[in-house]
C-alpha cells in the first residue's frame, strides 16, 4: 500500500490495520517517506483519533523500531516511573532513591526539559561531573550493585518515536491522546522494566490541563501496559500550582535533598511518598498502607538520601553537592518580586511561572538551547497563602538584571488575589489501578 493511501484512510476516519501501522512506523524510522506525508498522517490521527487496538499496535511498533533494554540479569521486580511533566517536578530525584532504598531496583532513563516543563537529566547535570550517559553494561551493572541508575535515554531507543515527536512539536499535533500514549509507553516498553507507574499531571501547568483528558490518557496508558504484560498503574496529580517552591535545575536538586533529609515543602513530600508507595505496591511489597509505611521509613531513617548519594558517586558526580547543597553556584543576579496588593493568593498559574523560569535561563525554547543550572526562581508564597502588599512572593535567579524584567511581568500576571481564602487544591486526584479500575482520592 502506498503511504498516500494510509493517509487517506485515516483522514476518512477508518482504522488502520496492523500492516499499515507497521509500514507507517518503519517508514518513519528509516526516513523513507517525506516529512510532509508523515505530518499529514499525524494531523489525520489528531483529528480522527485511533481505536484502543490501533494505539496498542502503534505503541508496540514504536517500541520495536530500535533498541530494547534487557533487564533480566537484574534480580527482583524492576519498576519504572514516568511523569507527563510539570513545573517544579523534581519527584524522580526523591522517589527513585526512596524505592531503591526499599530493595526494589529502579533502572531509570529520563529526558531533558523542553518549554515550561523541566527535565530530570538537566537537574542531574547541574551536579558537577555527574555522568548521565551510561553504556548499556555499565547501566545494568550499577542497577545490580546499588539498585538504582539515573541516566539519559539511549540514542536508539524508539527512534521512530523521536522522529514523530519532532514533527508533532512543529505541526500542532502534540495534544493527540493516542499519540501521547503511544509515545510515552513505547519508550517505557523499550526500557524493559517489569512494572510502570505513571504520574499524569492535570492543571494549568500540565501537558493536558483538563482532568478528563488526563484521566483518559492515564486509562489508555495503563491499558497499553496491561496488554504488554506490564504491571501498570497511574496517579493523576495536580499541576495548577508548581510542585514545591524551587523551579530551576540546581535549585530543584537542593530542594530534593532537603526532602530526603526529612524537611522540604509538604506538598512535594506528600506527592513523592504517594508515588513511591504505588511503585512499591506494583513490585509486590504489600498493600497500600504497608507500602506507604515502607517509603516513610526509608525517608526518615536516611536510607533514601544515602541511595541518592551512592548514585551520584557511582556516576562520577561530586557528592559534596549532596552533602552541602549550598555549594551550588549562585546566579549573579537575584531579584525579589513583591506582592502588589493584600489578600489571599487564589491562583499561581503554573504554566506562566514555568515560562518565567525559561526566560530566566532555566529552560529551553528549542531542543538545541542550553540551560543555566543556577537560573530559576524560589517561591516564598503559594496558592492559599495570605499576603500583604509588599510581601516577598518569589526570588528570581538569573545572569543579569535585564533577564529578570520580562520574567517578573510573567510572574505578576500568573498571580491572582481575593479577599476570600480559596478551597485547597488537590495534590492527588485519582488512581487508575493496574486492572483499569478507577479510585478517586482527592488528597490535599
Image (spheres, rainbow, N blue to C red):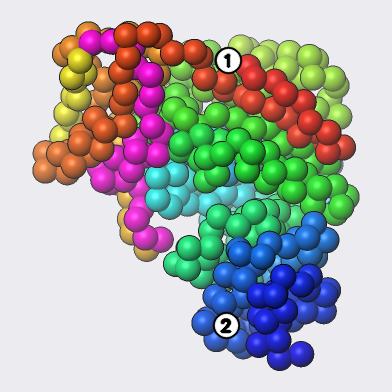
Q: Which residue lies furthest to the left in this view?
A: 402
Report x, y in % for residue 201: 57, 37
Q: Mark 2 points at which residue?
A: 37
Task: Name the side, left or right, on which 314 lies relative to 277.
Answer: left
Q: Name the residue under label 1.
A: 444
Question: Visible in this render: residue 326?
Answer: no
Task: Name the side, left or right, on which 338 lies relative to 120.
Answer: left
Classify the position of the C terminus by image quarter: top right
Which contiguous range is marked in magenta?
A: 342-367
Report x, y in % for residue 3: 68, 86
Report x, y in % for residue 150: 59, 44
- For residue 57, what is the image quadrant? bottom right
Q: Residue furthest front?
A: 12
> Whole-Å distance between the Cαs marked 1 and 2?
46 Å
Does residue 182 lie above or below 266 as drawn?
below
Q: What element carries label 1?
A: loop
Classify the position of the N terminus by image quarter: bottom right
Mark 1 and 2 residues: CB-CB less than 8 Å, in contact? Answer: no
For the residue pair 122 and 115, the one nearer the viewer reads as 115
Question: Visible in this render: residue 366?
Answer: yes
Which comes sooner in the sequence, label 1 or label 2?
2
Amino acid at each position: 500500500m502506498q503511504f498516500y493511501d494510509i493517509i487517506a484512510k485515516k483522514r476518512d476516519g477508518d482504522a488502520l490495520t496492523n500492516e499499515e501501522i507497521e509500514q507507517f512506523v518503519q517508514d518513519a524510522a528509516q526516513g523513507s517517506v517525506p516529512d510532509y506525508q508523515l505530518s499529514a498522517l499525524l494531523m489525520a490521527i489528531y483529528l480522527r483519533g485511533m481505536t484502543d487496538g490501533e494505539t496498542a499496535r502503534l505503541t508496540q511498533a514504536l517500541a520495536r523500531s530500535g533498541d530494547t533494554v534487557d533487564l533480566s540479569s537484574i534480580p527482583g521486580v524492576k519498576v519504572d516511573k514516568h511523569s507527563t511533566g510539570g513545573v517544579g517536578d523534581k519527584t524522580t530525584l526523591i522517589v527513585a532513591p526512596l524505592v531503591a532504598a526499599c530493595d526494589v531496583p529502579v533502572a531509570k532513563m529520563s529526558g531533558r526539559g523542553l518549554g515550561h516543563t523541566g527535565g530530570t537529566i538537566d537537574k542531574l547535570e547541574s551536579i558537577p561531573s555527574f555522568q548521565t550517559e551510561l553504556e548499556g553494561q555499565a547501566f545494568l551493572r550499577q542497577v545490580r550493585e546499588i539498585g538504582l541508575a539515573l541516566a539519559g535515554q539511549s540514542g536508539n531507543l524508539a527512534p521512530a518515536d523521536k522522529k514523530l515527536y519532532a514533527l508533532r512539536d512543529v505541526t500542532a499535533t502534540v495534544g493527540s491522546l493516542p499519540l501521547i500514549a503511544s509515545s510515552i509507553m513505547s519508550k517505557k516498553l523499550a526500557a524493559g522494566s517489569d512494572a510502570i507507574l505513571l504520574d499524569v499531571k492535570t492543571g494549568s501547568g500540565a501537558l493536558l490541563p483538563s482532568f478528563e483528558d488526563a484521566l483518559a490518557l492515564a486509562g489508555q496508558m495503563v491499558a497499553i501496559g496491561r496488554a504488554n504484560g506490564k504491571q501498570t498503574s497511574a496517579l493523576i496529580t495536580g499541576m495548577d500550582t508548581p510542585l514545591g517552591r524551587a523551579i530551576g535545575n540546581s535549585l530543584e536538586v537542593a530542594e530534593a535533598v532537603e526532602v530526603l533529609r526529612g524537611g522540604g515543602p509538604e506538598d512535594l513530600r506528600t506527592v513523592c511518598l504517594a508515588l513511591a508507595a504505588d511503585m512499591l505496591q506494583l513490585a509486590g511489597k504489600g498493600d497500600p498502607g504497608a507500602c506507604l509505611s515502607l517509603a516513610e521509613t526509608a525517608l526518615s531513617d536516611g536510607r533514601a538520601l544515602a541511595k541518592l548519594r551512592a548514585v551520584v558517586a557511582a556516576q562520577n558526580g561530586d557528592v559534596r553537592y549532596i552533602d552541602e547543597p549550598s555549594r551550588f553556584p549562585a546566579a549573579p543576579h537575584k531579584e525579589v518580586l513583591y506582592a502588589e496588593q493584600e489578600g489571599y493568593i487564589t491562583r499561581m498559574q503554573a504554566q506562566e511561572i514555568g515560562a518565567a523560569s525559561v526566560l530566566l535561563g532555566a529552560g529551553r525554547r528549542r531542543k538545541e538551547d542550553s540551560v543555566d543550572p543556577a537560573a530559576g526562581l524560589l517561591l516564598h508564597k503559594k496558592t492559599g497563602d495570605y499576603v500583604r502588599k509588599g510581601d516577598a512572593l518569589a526570588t528570581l535567579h538569573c545572569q543579569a538584571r535585564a533577564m529578570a524584567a520580562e520574567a517578573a511581568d510573567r510572574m505578576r500576571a500568573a498571580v491572582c488575589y481575593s479577599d476570600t481564602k480559596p478551597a485547597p487544591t488537590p495534590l492527588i486526584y485519582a488512581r487508575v489501578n493496574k486492572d483499569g479500575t478507577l479510585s478517586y482520592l482527592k488528597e490535599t
